Image: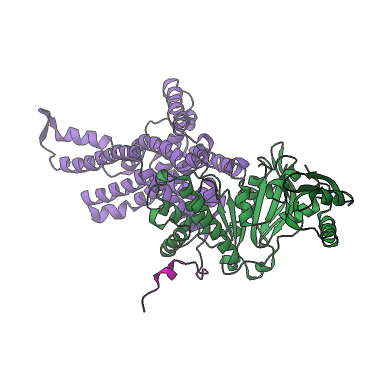
Chain colours: A purple, B green
Amino acid sequence: MGVQTDSLLRYRPWRGTPRGPLWGAAAVARVAVRLLAGRRLFWGLAALGLMVFFFFFYAQYLFVWIKTFTDETVRFAGVPVAVADLSKFLGRVNLDGSVHTFGNYVWFQGYILVIVLALAGSVLVGNDFAHGSLPFYLSKPIARRHYLLGKVLAVGAVVNLFTTLPAVVLWVQAGLLFDWHTYYVDNFHLLVGILGYGLLLTVTLGLLTVATAVWVRRTVPMVMAWVGPFVLLRMIAEWVVDGLKYDPRWRLIDLWNDLYLCGLWCLGADPRTIRPPAQPDVWEAALVVAGVCGGCLLYLRRRVQAVEIVQ
Amino acid sequence: MGPPIPTEALLRTDSGRGSDSSLVTDDCSLKPLLLFEHASKWYGPVLALNQVTLELTGGITGLVGANGAGKSTLLRLATGQIAPTLGRVTVRGTDARDWRARRLVGYCPDADAFYEDLSGRRFVRVMARLCGYARREADRRTDAALDLVGMTGRADRPLRGYSKGMRQRVKLAQALLHDPELLVLDEPLSGIDPVGRQDLLGLFRQLAATGKCLLVSSHELEALEKLTDHVVVMARGRVAAVGTLQQIRDRLDDYPLSVRVEVDRPREVARRLLALPEVVGVEVDAAGLVVRAHHPKRFFAAFGRLTVEDGWEVRRLEPLDESAHAVLGYLLGGSGRT
């Protein structure tokens, strides 16, 4: 007797137990990341991010390699440079597997990340609102908070792909380049700090991206909205604090700097080593970050309860 | 607009079986599948739904009404997309906004905007994962649902290349994925060719026969009439009438019923009928006569008596305005067009 394959395609009562809505949130995140990965622009920006990573990766290697030639000179474009000077320069830019290596890496990666998130926001969230895809999600057994959680997870995945994951790779590389027996043990707190910094970025940027995307929905306005906190406010803060020598608290209006200060605190950096030196206290920066997160949560809560979510 | 008809639980039929209803609680099957209790919805200053009380327990129910009558709002409330400003909407006793209630509800929205880069199969699979199914079960259900709507062979193409009819089928597939007790379908026949329409109408009947409850909103009254004679008529945010078209028509006593009668002696029959108190007018033409009468039941009883007494040879007796169009026309005060 042949196998009745058609019976497999017929409906039968569900006998298993569907998983909870948190799995639904994971499904939302998966499809969101997949959609983002389908954009060429995303891969172009990812390539730029990869270049920043490779700069740090090879510079760390170069730093260790150069230190083996302490009494020699190397030629750069035909110009002899003392290895000791080069080593001092590389040490100054903190490419030595220290706290500031990872802090600087995330700082520089932030320039690309902000553009990626502007794209991600409109692709992941804005499209659902602008094109009316939301009823498909919300007709499934997930609550609105699970939908938002899924989107925040997707943004978090992108953030970590650009920051935390490469930073962890740099930490592993630093251990292999230096004395790995002692490096991994002595600097384990750096790994924890990197993960903490990543978590902070995930939560803050995830909420901010989703909230902004819900607000403006389209890519160009989204980019313009990002320019405000991440470019304009930074320039104002630098001008006011460094140029006009006002209170360093003015730097609090620069959210990326606030995240940087909190991140360095996670990494256990000495506040005196932070550059530029005129900085607000970490707790003040943490308060601003918490305020931004709280504001985003309140806004999202208000929006998911509003009628417009299905309009 | 005609006189409002009291909303009653006319649509009660056998409750659903063989689906995921056990996912809420076992004793929930005793509660109405979908219950609106004095539900009102305001959009700012606009009252979209006004004190709607409605109970669905099974079978196929058509939802008809003019644009802006509140159909979409009613469907959104039923599927938990929005919350009522006043009143309550429950699915088997669970608030419709609760995600658990949506395990019992499948929704096929009117809008078909989704990620155009996805294939139909991928889209349905994503929806299956959203329902909480593990990968293997999601794949199995995706295949089953696509097979059910006749999209198995065409599901691997990107959505952007789909016709309107194919989109409707894929949307229907995602609504059927979790084998819901209640299916809420917003314009499910829109854009589907006549052959496909017959297939889907057959599928809807088949689903209803297995105990599922279908709430179908449609502007295509002819198709709706073929599917069901149970309708909810919406007008200006209110439920103007609930029941079968016949029941609704019978209650519209203030509106005379038009009946075409083809007999051998039309003038004599007209004279006799005009003597009846229910008859308000008769038009005689070459083919027979059109009688306009109040109180249809009494009129038909009197007509039958006279036919026997006078020995009329009635070749045809056809009510002209029991169609959904005509009933809607009476209720909505227009032509019945929606």
User: Considering depth in this image, is A221 or A225 the residue closer to the camera?
Assistant: A221
Residue extending furthest front? B265
Residue appearing at x 83%, y 55% in the figure: B299
In this view, the residue in front, A81 or A219, is A219
Question: Which residue is situated farthest in the top direction here?
Answer: A244
| Quarter where residue B121 is shown | bottom left
Give the number of callouts: 0
Tell me if residue B69 can be seen. yes
Magenta range is A1-14
Give the residue at the far bottom of this rendering.
A1
Where in the figure is residue A266, as x and y percent of width and height?
41, 46
Residue at position x 69%, y 68% in the image:
B30
Classify residue A307 as left or right of residue B246. left
Residue A33, placed above or below residue B90 = above
Q: Position of residue B278 (x, y in %)?
A: 87, 51
Quadrant of residue A69 within the rendered picture: top left
Q: Is residue A183 magenta?
A: no
Instruction: Locate the N terminus of chain B and report the quarter of the image it occupies.
Output: top right
Most frequent secondary structure within the magenta stretch: loop
* Image position, residue A123 (x, y; %): 43, 40
Q: Is residue B80 left or right of residue B243?
A: left
Which quadrant is home to the C terminus of chain B? top right
Is residue A267 visible in this depiction of the protein?
Answer: no
Name the spot of residue A105 as percent of width and height, x first: 32, 40
Q: Is residue A22 above or below residue A233?
A: below
Q: Which sits in the foreground, A3 or B44?
A: A3
